[in-house]
Image (cartoon, rainbow, N blue to C red):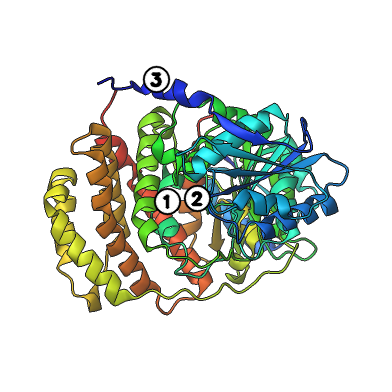
Amino acid sequence: MAKILIVDDEEGIRMLYSMELQDEGYQVITLPDGKDLLEVVDREHPDCIVLDIKMREYSGLDLLQRLRKKYYDLPVILNSAYSSFKVDLKAVAADYYVVKSSDLTELKEKLKIALETKLPR
Amino acid sequence: MHVPSPQDQYSRHSVMKFTECNPQSVNKADIVVAIPSYKEAASISLPTKQADIGLTKYYSHKSGVIINCDNGSPDGTTQAFFDTETKIPKMSLSTETGLVGKGYNLRSLFQKAVELSAKAVIVLDADVKNITPQWIRNLCEPLFDDYHFVAPLYVRHKYDGSFTNNLVYPMTRTLYGRRVRQPIGGEVGFSGETAKLYLDCDYWDENVGQFGINLWMTTLAVKSPGAVIQSFMGRTKIHRVRDFSADIARMFSQVVATLFELMCRFETYWKQVKWSRPTAVFGFGVGEVQVPPPVDIDATALSSAMREGLQKNWDMYRQCVEEPNFNKLEEVASLPDSDFEFPTNLWARILFDFGVAYRNSAVPRDALVESLIPLYYAKTLSFVLDTEAMNTQQVEELVEDQCLQFEKAKPYLIEKWPTK
């Protein structure tokens, strides 16, 4: 069972995503901010991270840069209410960018693709 | 007549002869900045000077050398290079008489970089007009942070780089699974280990020796275990103005032939690749971001060239393109310019059909690759019409969406590709 880490400062989003993604058969863990992100990733080894961009004290884009330094190929999906961050070059380092919506079809599709992605090493 | 076997060719190219001019007797360098050239006497001074400033400003604690890799230019390019005053030592390498091409220049560079025990090698085009010292830092820095290959990332106008946007990027990403946005960008950086990897590769031919070199380097780097990064250059590259018309067909054919040849050689690798992974970016927040200069495309001329070329090549397409795709292609060709559209899914499948035809040598390979040009014009025309009202960011999203369509079509390629 793939383990998904949701990082979002909105409790409602964390609850909605947890329920919907658990229904899809994923194991879900959540974080309310980026404070302990690297430690949680070290400990929990998630298969994919769904990362909010605009959090109260943290920028998802900056967290992504920190993640990429240590986890070159860990799938990360940026998830924001705003599409404007797409122009930020830091977003290029994410696997996908999904604009938040009450319909999670796109997020689920990108999650599936991110988890299926395979590069020989 | 003795026809050399492929193996003869590899051994012929494994060690390449070149003439070296090394007035300061440099025999070791941490950083090599290389400027490949042919007849660039009027332009080479600028990148040489900027490389000198960049190395002095950012890497005074490391040893460096600037190398001009030339093809024996008759216009005094190498002299102009040496006449440029620099603090960093310089040397030149010149390929054998008659051997012309960027790839051959870089082949001599790979050998020299290994001899010098270089940790980082930067390549700059000789005719670039707006290079800054920052470029040296952006291309070099990741190589001292465990990355093995640095590809450039530019902000480009929506019609600049159509060949990259519509063909080279989606194909490379789909095949090898790594998103390198400018796989044929001229400015790159690579580690000493990667230089060795290039020297050890047993695939080298005329196309790689010329315009195919950048794709060859990117592909080998992407499929090697070393980490790859993109470096944001801030500015759009501006070249010296020259008449590209004669070079366009040659460039297209050499790059596409290299793409297909790499496909044949690395089939075991790309068949295992599913979807794609992003590549990290270095260099935001440094230097200014410029608005890319506009690029005009004459849609009427493009349409004429496309329709004339399609007419000429229908027999070839009938032989190489699978019937359902061929039928769709006929439908697309019948559309008037006002409603012209070349669906990306069809374009991807046709490119895959061409790759398979190349692999099978179903028709002469040179003619096959050349016949792809009108189809590329068709895709470019469709892209221009689609994106007329879009800004750079919207076009970027469209390119990403096209890539996803290529990736979704990949099972078709795997199904059609003959098993060994």
> What type is the residue that disc 1 sits on?
Val
* SS state under label 3: helix
Residue at mark 2 to residue at mark 3: CA–CA distance: 28 Å
Q: Residue at x 60, y 74 (%)?
A: B291
Q: Chain of mark 2?
A: B
Q: Which mark identifies residue B241?
A: none
Disc 3/disc 1 C-alpha distance (Å): 30 Å
Q: Amino acid at mark 2?
A: Ile
- Circle 3 packing at 10 Å, graded few (<14), some (14-19), many (20+), is few
**Residue matched to label 2:** B184
Q: Which residue is mark 3?
A: B8
Mark pair 1, 2: CA separation = 8 Å
Bin the neighbour count of mark 2 within 10 Å (Cα to Cα): few under 14, some 14-19, many 20 and up. Answer: many
Question: Depth-wise, is mark 2 or mark 3 nearer the camera?
Answer: 3
Which comes sooner in the sequence, label 3 or label 1? 3
The residue furthest right is: B61
At horizontal 45% and vertical 43% (from top left) the residue drawn is B210
Of B152 and A118, nearer the camera is B152
- Percent x, y of residue B250: 36, 51
Numbered label tally: 3
Q: Quadrant of the N terminus of chain B?
A: top left
Q: Is residue B310 left or right of residue A102?
A: left
Asked where in the image residue A62 lies, by quadrant, the reply is: bottom right
Secondary structure found at label 1: helix
Q: Which mark is residue B168?
A: 1
Quadrant assignment for the C terminus of chain B: top left
Q: Are marks 3 and 1 on the same chain?
A: yes
Left or right: residue B116 compared with residue B241? right
- x and y percent of residue A104 in the render? 49, 59
Please, what is the three-letter code of the amino acid marked with disc 3? Asp
